Image (cartoon, rainbow, N blue to C red):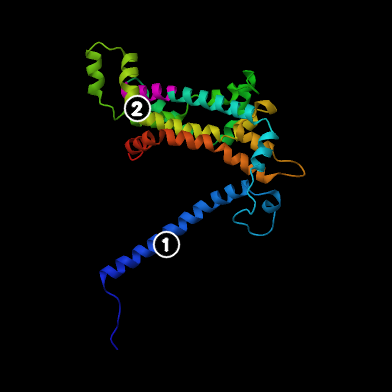
Amino acid sequence: MAKTKSSNPNERSILSQIVLWLALILGALVMVFPIYWMIMTTIMPQSEAFSRSLILFPESPTLENFIEGWNNSPWPRWYANTFFIVITSVTGSVFMNLLAGYTFAKFEFRGRNVIFFSIIATLMIPLQVLLVPRFLIISSLGWVNSYWSVIGPHMAEPFGLFFMRQFMLDIPDELLEAARLDGAGEFTIFRKIVVPLAKPAIAVLVILGFSTRWNAFAWPLVALTKKEMLTVQLGINFMKGYYYTDWPAIIAMVLVSIIPIIVVFLAFQRYFIAGIARTGIK
C-alpha cells in the first residue's frame, strides 16, 4: 500500500503559522488574565468579590473599594513619603553612577580594574545578609525612622556603576580629546558632552531605579516602624487586619500603586529601548 502524506511546503507553513499563533494567543491570555481578574475584583461589590461562584464581570460595578481603601488609611502621607524617597534616591544614584561610570571607563589609575571588579562582586551578596549590618550602621547614625535610612543605602549601586561604565566605553575618546584641546575642563566635558550622550543609559537607570525603590519592601520594613513614615508598599501590607481583611480594597490600592511606575516607563520608554540596545547586547 502506498504511503500518503502531505508534502506541500505551503500547507506545512500555514499549519505551523496557525500553531504558532494559537500558542501566542494562549500565552497572552495566560499573562493577561491575572491583571483582568485584579481589575474586575476592584470594581466588584463585597458580595460578589467573596462569592464562591466564578464571576468574570461584576453585575453591579462600583468604585466603593477604591473609596474605602483610600479613606481608611493615610494614603496622601504614604504617597508623599514614597515619592520623596524614590525621587531623591534615584536622582542621587543616577548622578553618582554617572560620575563613577565615566571615571572607570575613561580614566586610567592604579588598581582601577581591581576596585571595579570588587564593587561588582558585591552584587552576589543577598539583601538578607546585609539587613543586620546595614541596620546597625543606620542605628549608629541615628537614621532609624528617618527618610535617610532608606535613601542613604541606595545612593550608589554596583549594577548602576556597571551599566553606566559599559555605556561610557562606547563614547569615542577622540571626542573628549577634541574638547580638551579646545580648552574645555573636565567638568565642562562631563556636563556638556558626556551627560547628553548618556541620556539612553540615564533613562534605563531611572526606570529600573524607580520601579525597584517604589516596590521595595524588606529594607523599608526594617528601617521604618512609625505609621506616618510608611511607604506605599508597607501601607498596603498595613491594611491587613487580624480578624478581617478587605481584600477588594487592598487590591484596589495595589492597582493605584502601580500607576506611577507605568507613567515613568511610558515617559522614558523611547530612551529605555535605545539604552538597552546599545548596552545590553554586549
Q: Is residue 252 left or right of residue 211?
A: right
Image depth: mark 2 or mark 1 in front: 1
- Residue shown at the point (50%, 32%) measured from the top left: 210
Q: Does the magenta stretch include residue 147?
A: no
Which numbered circle lies on residue 22?
1
Circle 1 SS class: helix
Circle 2 SS class: loop
Viewer-nearest residue: 188 or 12? 12
Q: Where does residue 238 sit, x and y in percent of width and height?
A: 68, 36
Q: What residue type is labelled 1?
A: Leu
Q: Does the magenta stretch include residue 105?
A: yes
Q: Residue furthest top?
A: 183
Q: Where does residue 197 sit, x and y in percent of width and height?
A: 32, 26
Q: Give the range drawn in magenta.
A: 95-107
Q: Where does residue 70 sit, x and y in percent of width and height?
A: 66, 35
**Residue 159 quadrant:** top left
Viewer-nearest residue: 123 or 182? 182
Q: Which amino acid does label 2 sit on?
A: Ala
The residue pinned by badge 2 equals 198
Instruction: Work out whether residue 142 can be spotted.
Output: yes
Viewer-nearest residue: 250 or 157? 250
Q: How far apart are marks 2 and 1 (CA)?
A: 41 Å
- In the picture, which quadrant includes the N terminus? bottom left
Mark 1 is surrounded, within 10 Å at the Cα level, by few (under 14), some (14 to 19) or many (20 or more) other residues, namely few
